[in-house]
Amino acid sequence: MRIITGTAKGTKLVTLSGDDTRPTSEIVKEAVFSAIQFDLHDRSILDLFGGSGQLSLEALSRGAKNAVIVDANRSATDIIKSNATKTKLMEKCRIATADWKEYLKGVKGKEAFGLVFLDPPYKAGFIDEVLKRLYTSEILAKDAIIVCESEEDGVPEPIDGKEQKLYKYGRTYISIIRLA
C-alpha cells in the first residue's frame, strides 16, 4: 500500500494486521481518485473510518487542504499518525480516536467538510445510517462530495436531490455522492 501521486508519491504506508481494518485496494483507490481528481484542491476532508488513513493521505498528497481522520480503534489511530508523519502530511491532519456517532455529535455545526470518505465495516444498511446522521450533522459544505466503499448489499440508497454514481470493482462498490 502506497501513496500513488502528489507530494508524498511512492511513500509506503502500513496498516493494522488482522481483520480490524480492510485497506482499499490500489485499483479501487486509483479509480476513486480518477473520479474526483479535479475536485480535491483546497477541500477539507472528513474520514470517519480512517483505518490506515490512506484515502485522506492520498487526497492531501494531491492538494486537499486538511483532514480530520477518525477511527474508534486506538491502534488504528496510532498507525494513521505514523503514516501521516511518514508522508510529511501530519501538519495537515487532525486524528481522533472516537466512535463515528460521538464524533458527529460533537462536531455538529462547527466545521464544514467538502470531501467525506466512508469506508466502514461492510454491513447491509450501515452506510445508509451513517449518511442520515452525516446529512443532519450540519458539517457538509454545500458542494460536498461523499465517497462510500461497500459490498453490493451495503450500497447506499439514492437520496432525492443528490447526484450519485456507482462504480463496481470486483466485489467492491464505490458510491460517489455530490451534494451540489
Image (cartoon, rainbow, N blue to C red):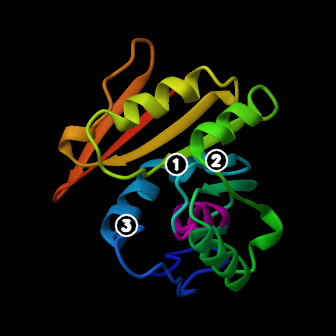
Instruction: Reply above or below: 157 against 1.
Output: above
Residue drawn at x 65%, y 52% as measured from the top left: 98
Report if residue 51 lies within the magenta region: no
Tell me where residue 140 sits by quadrant. Answer: top right
Judging from the image, what secondary structure is the residue with disc 1 in? strand
Q: Earlier in the sequence, mark 1 or mark 3?
A: 3
Cα gap from disc 3 to disc 2, whole angstroms: 18 Å
Give the numbered dot on residue 22: 3
Look at mark 1 in the image and give the residue it sits on.
117
Q: Which quadrant is the C terminus positioned in?
A: top right
Amino acid at pointer 1: Phe
Name the mark nearer the viewer: 3 or 2: 3
Q: Residue at x 61, y 20 (%)?
A: 136
The residue segment tinted magenta is 52-60
Residue 141, percent across and down?
68, 29
- Which quadrant holds residue 27? bottom left
Residue 40: image x %, image y %? 62, 50
Residue at horizontal 53 percent and vertical 69 percent from the top:
54
Q: Secondary structure at mark 3?
A: loop
Decide whether the magenta segment is chiefly helix, strand or loop. helix
Q: Up-down: is 137 above or below 8?
A: above
Mark 3–mark 2 CB contact (< 8 Å): no
> Do the numbered discs 2 and 1 sit on residues whose CB atoms are within 8 Å?
yes
Residue 104 % position (x, y)? 66, 35
What kind of residue is marked 2? Leu
Instruction: Report which residue position mark 2 lands on.
Output: 46
Inspect this view and state whether residue 180 appears.
no
Give the x, y percent position of residue 10: 54, 86
